[in-house]
Image (cartoon, coloured by chain):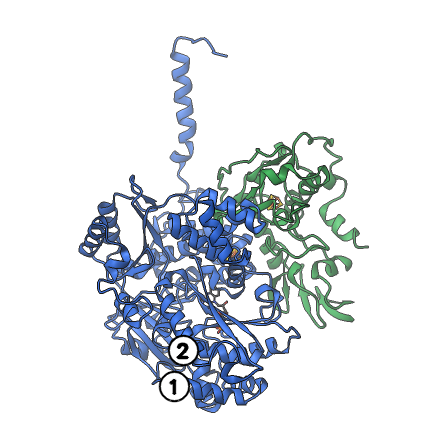
Amino acid sequence: MSIQITLDGRPVSTQAGANLVDVAAEHGVYIPTLCYLKGKPCLGTCRICSVSVNGRIAAACTVSVSDGMIVAVDEPALADMRKALIEMLFIEGNHNCPSCEKSGRCDLQAVGYDVGMLVPRFPYRFTPHQREVGAERIWLERDRCIFCQRCVDYIHDQHSGQKIFTIKGRGSNARIEIDKTLADQMSAEQVREAAELCPVGCIIEKGVGFNRPIGERKFEIKSVRQRALEDDV
Amino acid sequence: MNKKVLSIVKRYQADKTRLLDMLWEIQRQYDYIPHGAILTLADELNLSVNDIRETSSFYHFFHMRPAGKHRFYLSNTVIARMNGYQQVLMALEQATGATLGSMDVSGTFGVYDTACIGLSDQEPAMLIDDVVFTRLTVDKVQWIIAQLQQGYSAAEIANPQQLPTHSIAYVDQLVETHICQAGPVFFQQETDYHRLLQQCLTHDPDAVIKTVLNARLQGLGGAGFSTGEKWRLCRETASQTKYVIGNADEGEPGTYKDRALLIRSPKEVFLGMIIAAWAIGAAQGILYLRAEYIYLKQFLETELQQLREAGLLGRHILGREDFSFDIRIQMGAGAYICGDESALLESCEGKRGTPRVKPPFPAQQGYLGMPTTVNNVETLAAVTRLMEKGAAWYAGLGFATSAGSRLVSVSGDCARPGIYEVEWGLTLNQLLEQVGAVEPWAIQVSGPSGECVAVELSGERRFGYDDLVCNGSLMIFNRSRDLLDIVHQFMQFFVTESCGICTPCRVGNVELRQKIERIIAGKGCQQDLDDLLSWGEIIRRTSRCGLGATSPNPILTTLAQFNQLYQAKLIASQGTLLPSFDVKAALQGHEQARIKVMQIESEPSKEVVK
Ligand SMILES: Cc1cc2nc3c(=O)[nH]c(=O)nc-3n(C[C@H](O)[C@H](O)[C@H](O)COP(=O)(O)O)c2cc1C
Ligand code: SF4
Ligand code: SF4
């Protein structure tokens, strides 16, 4: 069903039930995301797509558009809120971009650039996170995990359907675990899928990496914003 | 071990949604959950080992390592701290040889603290091995441990007369139930449940929903959503299978009114569930009972059995072939977040209590993906009463925007802590007078997730959805209490209880807590207060669920009404550095390294060993 919504003051027609992140992108409004993956079930974890929907703040990835909806994205206060959330992720982990294999291809780094993050308003924690290197082909560099849950929800053992990546604990102590036995049974494609799925450099495929010259990496060729907007044109 | 675990799995028909129950049984067997048991569970349930751990590691009461044969969980609420928590804890540690958070060397005793266990009118209190001890003193603690050392079980010590554990006498022996003000809605004389249900079932479900709508009953669990509306939404879904869930998680620090209802009016609560089932068309119900109330389980099971025997529950209720409904009790395992209805559903399905992304709402897709109505225990009891007395009667109580009444659990600085039924419209001052508040200064309304108000400024506010909303918790503090310390404890509570799935709540609350620590330490400046406000606002507005949406409240509401407390702690920045920045400490690492280098250089050179 065709409906009308108001997007940053502009009337926009779209289909009822479509995802707000996609609708906005289709109409040239970029909403940064980290956990959201088009076509996959919504995770709603990172919250960096927070926008105003009918006067209330909502994570755009959790919103299906409906007729008459009034959406605001490009407002300074909202942009600052999103920036704060990105900053939180930076201070929670240890993101040393120059030494990271994912640098240039990392969604967190890319959205950080996009929102113009320089120095986070929150103090760096420098919390040590134990890395997990026991699986044959996967290296889990927990310093960089942003706890988006993509690996937990989207990667399952191809035979049993069991979870390979899981959560342990709760709150600020929660961390991602990897089932080494199941991980070692993953196909090469699935290992690659997991590493690609991880928006940051936490799930790393052993034996490959730093294989793209600086200047030719994903977000250096085309920014995260351009990608989001153009993919939908 | 394998055999025992297998038999447990078998008892639950290898149903992974019953994982919490299985983990409980395993822990009862071994006093913790051994790795071997997890391996067996994983095999039998077709879950990865880590998937089982995802659940087990989420809940406070599950232990993955030996945690003591007798496990003490001392409630660490602010109310307990006003009543000798610290002395009791020291006595516990001394008598057991265990330090907080661990067990003694022999593995006999484990001492842990835990969030509010729903006994704020009789703190300090603690759970030991499925029973509870209240009004703890140093002497009492020493006596309990001496008894345990002599070989008595906690159950024997708590219940010396060996009253049957399903009896009300047993429950009354363990905990006191102070109902100080009852009526018109709650704790009234025995209703004729048989007649009442018969009468309800003569009306078709839509008519029942209409009655609840007309009564203007709003959920009493906190969110205040219209109960009739919730039922209507659930009824209108096409699904054949629907569920009714009674939320007895009662995790908000300071509340214990649901415990009182379950003890004094259990049938009223269950009848509410039966009526809900009739209204929405459900055949199965669950009472989600917090682990802290385990000592009520057998009593409640017996109450359910009595209802079954009376034909009010089970197959063909009151002889009607078109209505069968039964209720089972699901035990929680220690997680405040599981009071959130969608986290509760996850927990009922045997998973970690992650609040779901909404929509879909439980009424559309709830337990096992089926339309589900989740109602608070008190809401369910109110349903029973309003069906008995009629919608007009209920709607006539309270005032325009807020119909009916609600139970308030009162604790803190007052002469008569206990349960008070408050008709909406009563002012805070009126209630304070009723409870014999002693020089009340700051009132924490609705627990940490609610608001802290100054009696001076807010005493004349009235309880109601348009003014002083209350979820059933009310803590009274006089001027001798350290409010900033209380704020800090509340923030610690949210940090501990956050599920951690979303960024603002997981990361932000730690930052807020640290700021409060800085201010309490006398190292804060105006900038820190500004940060508290703006960061609190960000967390409140962007969090995924109600926990994060309310977690900054202890700070935001005290900043609003007790600003001078913060101001008094601030110091001015000198120069360009923040007062919290400790130049010496910051340079210490460098200084140490410099000294080390000097030492190395002055030593005679050593061979470098390769
Ligand atoms: C963090 C959190 C904890 C909650 N704890 C409880 C609780 O212990 N008991 C309860 O009835 N509702 C609790 N709720 C509210 C429930 O989500 C839900 O609104 C309520 O059970 C619905 O019942 P009602 O409509 O009868 O109030 C909690 C909500 C949140 C966000
Ligand atoms: S490992 Fe990567 S994909 Fe998994 S939760 Fe962490 S950041 Fe997300
Ligand atoms: S707000 Fe807190 S408790 Fe709620 S989903 Fe987010 S992390 Fe979990």
Q: Is residue A220 above or below residue B252?
A: above
Q: Residues within 10 Å of mark 1 (few under 14, many from 20)?
A: some
How far is mark 1 from mark 2, CA to CA? 9 Å
Can residue B330 be seen from the camera position used here?
A: yes
Can residue B469 be seen from the camera position used here?
A: no
Residue at image coords 74%, 57%: A25
Q: Secondary structure at mark 1?
A: loop
Chain A: give its colour.
green
Horizontal relation, residue A129 to residue B183: left or right: right
Residue type marked 1: Thr
Horizontal relation, residue B306 to residue A145: left or right: left
Image marks 1 and 2: residues in contact by CB distance under 8 Å:
yes
Residue nearest the observer in this picture, B194 or B569: B194
Residue B450 coordinates in the image, percent (x, y):
42, 67
Residue at image coords 38%, 12%: B602
Residue B384 coordinates in the image, percent (x, y):
44, 82
Residue B314 coordinates in the image, percent (x, y):
50, 76
Question: Residue B454 occupies which quadrant of the picture?
Answer: bottom left
- Quadrant location of the N terminus of chain B in the rendered image: top left
Disc 2: which chain? B
Q: Is residue B346 above or below residue A2?
A: above
Is the residue indicated by label 1 positioned so its CB lies within 8 Å of ligand 1?
Answer: no
Chain B: give its colour.
blue
Q: Secondary structure at mark 2?
A: helix
Q: Which mark is on residue B267?
A: 2
- Mark 1 — residue? B191
Residue type marked 2: Lys
